[in-house]
Amino acid sequence: MAENGSIKKIAVFTSGGDAPGMNAAVRAVVRACSYNNVQVAGIYRGYQGLIEGDIEELSARSVNHILQRGGTFLKSARSADFRKKEGRKKAYEKLNSHGIDALVAIGGDGTFTGAFHFNKEFDFPIIGIPGTIDNDLYGTDFTIGFDTCLNTVIDAVDKIRDTAASHNRLFFVEVMGRDAGFIAAHAGLASGALAVMIPERHMSIDQLLERLSDARRHNKSSSIVIVAEGGESGDATRIAKEVQERMPYYDTRVTILGHLQRGGSPSCFDRNLASRLGVAAVEYLIKGERDSMVGIIDRKVVLTPFEKAISEKLQLNPEIIRISDILSI
Ligand code: F6P
């Protein structure tokens, strides 16, 4: 552990897919540094910007009025160069030349995999903050951006439901989540979807058809099926085509929500989560912690080693699916 006072300058960056609330997290890191008399710098475009030395000194005032803004003012990127040892060496040199002695990395599992390797090679203090709409990180109940994304998705599905009901149509709505079904499952429950197709619980087309037949028997004239983009049961367009062929009396439509799920002003929940985690990350670095992700589990701030955060899988709460199934009758 580093001694108190040995961290003089911290740099913060955002990496991977952006998420609403990343700005709030950067603000919290910058202001917590100022509060603790630690210098702070912002690295633009994640690891790629670090390799290229795209670094700027920040102050408490540099982060005025960003709490409520979506996206990330530090920009984000997925860096192929940082996956190579040579790229990581350049990054280390840039950190030294800027007098930076610790990092706060805001992102998802790709970001933390990079941080894990970097720490192994250069023994450099890094704390990660989970920022991704996917919510697929072990070591925290919620990631920054997930709640805002869910609100965006249910707002869209509510609107789709209006037109679905007017035309007695069956809609397949594809949502993001990469290989995980958190967005689909939670948004499915909150929007009253007839079914959710997620990688964590594979539903075959036959099972889906059975559910649709039941819905017809129960006089449902329109329905929404939420499809997670990843896994065997992903691809709303393919599923809709198969259902249309086997149930020609249905008038089916597909909506792929896409990147609109990543935008927008962060919700109250995400702003507060980001603020708590940003301050915690700085406090942990000052205390000498490193090589870990900060998260909140059961309302308490906790640290999880990067190795564990990237190798273990956060389990989707089966209760979400069970309740959804009961209510879709
Ligand atoms: O990880 C966040 C995420 O939005 C995933 O849900 C999605 O699969 C992916 O990023 C899309 O990445 P890109 O913006 O590079 O197309």
Image (cartoon, rainbow, N blue to C red):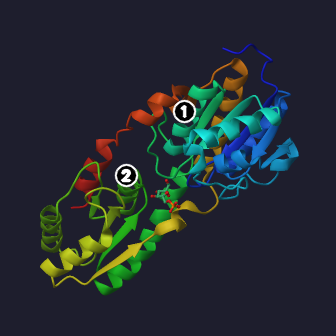
How far apart are the two marked residues, 2 and 1, measured between alpha carbons? 23 Å
Lower position in the chain sequence, tag 2 or tag 1: 1
- Identity of the amino acid at label 2? Asp
Locate residue 219, reporting x and y percent.
Answer: 18, 75
Asked if disc 2 and disc 1 are in contact, CB closer than 8 Å, the reply is no
Which residue is label 1 attached to?
Answer: 117
Around disc 1, counting alpha carbons within 10 Å, would you say few (fewer than 14), some (14 to 19), or many (20 or more)?
some
Which callout, 2 or 1, points to the residue nearer the camera? 1
Locate residue 249, reporting x and y percent.
Answer: 16, 85
Helix, strand or loop for disc 1: helix
- Identity of the amino acid at label 1? His
Locate residue 11, reporting x and y percent.
Answer: 75, 38
- The residue sitting at 13% across, 71% down in the picture is 213
| Disc on res. 234 | none
Nearest to the observer: residue 64 or residue 188: 64
Task: Determine whether, in the image, residue 27 is placed left or right of residue 188.
Answer: right
Which residue is label 2 attached to?
Answer: 179
- The residue sitting at 16% across, 74% down in the picture is 216
Which quadrant of the figure has residue 130? top right
Q: Which quarter of the figure is the N terminus placed in? A: top right
Query: Is residue 298 something one can see in this rendering?
Result: no
